[in-house]
Image: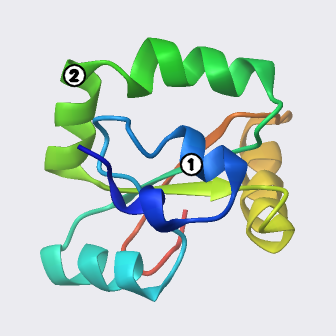
Amino acid sequence: MPNALAAEKSPYLLQHADNPVAWQPWGEAAFAQARREDKPIFLSIGYATCHWCHVMAHESFENAAVAELLNQHFVAIKVDREERPDVDKVYMAYVQALTGHGGWPLSAWLTPDLKP
């Protein structure tokens, strides 16, 4: 069953529209859900031609057990870095400051008010 990404135009987001993860696009609807349900956000940023993004999708996001865990405990948001470079810039800077390196796919865990 398609998730909320099925209505998006981004080729990258559409690649994840049939994942068992209940992905949502970056936006107020997802943020409001996180606040309402008091759940942290699992943020995944990538792009359509990223090899490792495809590997992670296949090994993790197509896995029913991983999807169940994400769906139960997080609001999962998927971002196309080519569509939202502003979002990518903020969270890549955070990951690089925290770990000393960064790349894609980028995964970050956020509070419902978008703080890492």
Q: Is residue 45 visible?
A: no
The quadrant the C terminus occupies is bottom right
Dividing the picture into quadrants, the one containing residue 102 is top right
Q: Is residue 21 above or below residue 43?
A: above
The quadrant the N terminus occupies is top left
Q: Nearer the viewer, residue 104 or 93?
A: 104
Q: Dot 1 corresponds to which residue?
A: 14
Q: Dot 2 corresponds to which residue?
A: 64
Dividing the picture into quadrants, the one containing residue 55 is top right
Q: Which of the marked residues, 1 or 2, is nearer the chain's N terminus?
A: 1
**Residue 112 percent location from the top left of the image:** 36, 74
In 3D space, how far apart are the residues under numbered discs 1 and 2 (Cα atoms)?
A: 19 Å
Q: Nearer the viewer, mark 1 or mark 2?
A: 1
**Residue 114 percent location from the top left of the image:** 51, 74
Q: Secondary structure at mark 1?
A: helix
Total number of numbered labels? 2
**Residue 106 percent location from the top left of the image:** 68, 40
Q: Residue, x 31% and y 41% (percent of image)? A: 21
Q: Neighbour class for label 2 at 10 Å: few (<14), some, many (≥20)?
A: few
Q: What numbered label is drawn on residue 79?
A: none
Give the residue type that dot 2 points to: Ala
Q: Residue, x 85% and y 35% (percent of image)? A: 100
Q: Is residue 33 left or right of residue 109?
A: left
